[in-house]
Amino acid sequence: LESAAVVKDEVIFSTYDSAPIGVRVVMPRRMPTDNTSPMCVFLHGGGWVFGGRGTHDHIARRFAYSGIVTVLIEYRRSPEHRFPVPLLDCMDGIQWASRTAPGLGCDPTQLVVAGDSAGANLAFAACLKGRDNDWAGYEHDSGPVAGMLLVYPCLSRQLVTEPGGSYERFAEGYGLSRDDMAWYWEQYGGCPVGDPVDPEEEPYLAPLDVRANFSLMPPAKILLADHDVLRDDGEQMAGRLRAAGVHVSVDSVRYTVHGLYHNRRLDPGAWEAFMEKSVDSSGEPPRGSDGPRGPRAARDATRRALLRSTWVQASRRGEGKVPGGWANRLPALPAPHGACAGWLCTTPTPRPR
């Protein structure tokens, strides 16, 4: 990956308070000459508190290896800079990328906004606020952002789901806990979860917590870890977007926990599976990967053992009990909804007239 990309660091300035914002452009070493390369603006996760270009540079290089020019935005982090400052920084970065796309050899009509965890929250909120601020193109039923890639997004401050949902089943013992999310939301929003916030700003803070109109949003591909407190956030948002006439593709990596999208050292197989699903142009599983003895089955067995070990360690620390037969009741991979070419969903659901 180190030799597959060319890196350029830039500085832009906030339209909110003129503060400098770091931008890293990671380009394939071999670029087409006809300005047809796709572009991705990637917003890093880390609970709005941690992370940066250093923690997600390898993701940008993996995208560049697949021919995608990737822009990493070094938005300001909480608690020093609370909502909406990180969001406004991301919006400035997206608009900068859109303006400079032709100069970077990219097709500005193939701009995708992506993010993982808190970055996915910012990606969705930036597209929503851009729609409401009349970014050029939305009035023609097609905004300046061609698609969204949302990796286990956090979209609700309520931290509750239906009985047996992800916030109940995976509240602790799977890496990111429910209490962790409460702390992160407090750092970003500036108040404890459950406290009221400005109703005019809430759609851009926690979109699932309001009855917002999501029509005319870009098509979305949502990737989930199936043992993650945030799993239900992604599934619920997929339902809300479909109800608004937006095409959505949902996919998952089996036997994975939160954080494996960027942590390739913890589980290289899971990381590569996430990368394949992020940049895959067909939406089809790799040939030869199915079957009880294939490579995919071997990776699933490894992750099953990893999760069992996680539960055992949590039990020894007094954080939970290992349910009887738990390893045999791991959920199956949810079937994807719709077809997705790359990140851009090419079979949009007809909008209601």
Image: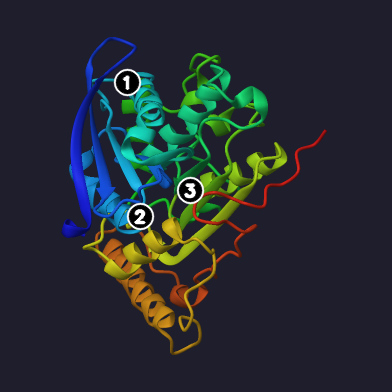
Q: Residue at label 1?
A: 82
Q: Secondary structure at mark 1?
A: loop
Task: Tell which of 33 and 5 is nearer to you.
Answer: 33
Mark 3 residue type: Tyr
Q: Secondary structure at mark 3?
A: helix
Of the 4 image quadrants, the one containing the N terminus is bottom left
Q: In the displayed structure, would residue 320 be above or below residue 220?
A: below
**Label 3 with label 1: CB-CB less than 8 Å:** no
Q: Is residue 241 left or right of residue 65?
A: right
**Mark 1 crowd level (few <14, some 14–19, many ≥20, 10 Å Cα):** some
**Label 2 with label 1: CB-CB less than 8 Å:** no
- Depth-wise, is mark 2 or mark 1 nearer the camera? 2
Task: Tell which of 338 and 243 is nearer to you.
Answer: 338
Q: Residue at label 3?
A: 167
Q: In the displayed structure, would residue 308 be above or below residue 75?
A: below
Q: Residue at label 2?
A: 67
Q: Is residue 84 left or right of residue 109?
A: left
Q: Residue at x 30, y 58 (%)?
A: 65
Q: Position of residue 323 (x, y in %)?
A: 44, 69
Label 3 – label 2 distance at C-alpha: 37 Å
Q: Residue at x 58, y 25 (%)?
A: 137
Q: Is residue 135 left or right of residue 93?
A: right
- Depth-wise, is mark 3 or mark 1 nearer the camera? 1
Of the 4 image quadrants, the one containing the C terminus is top right
Mark 2 residue type: Gly
**Mark 2 crowd level (few <14, some 14–19, many ≥20, 10 Å Cα):** many
The earlier-in-sequence mark between 2 and 1 is 2
Mark 1 residue type: Arg
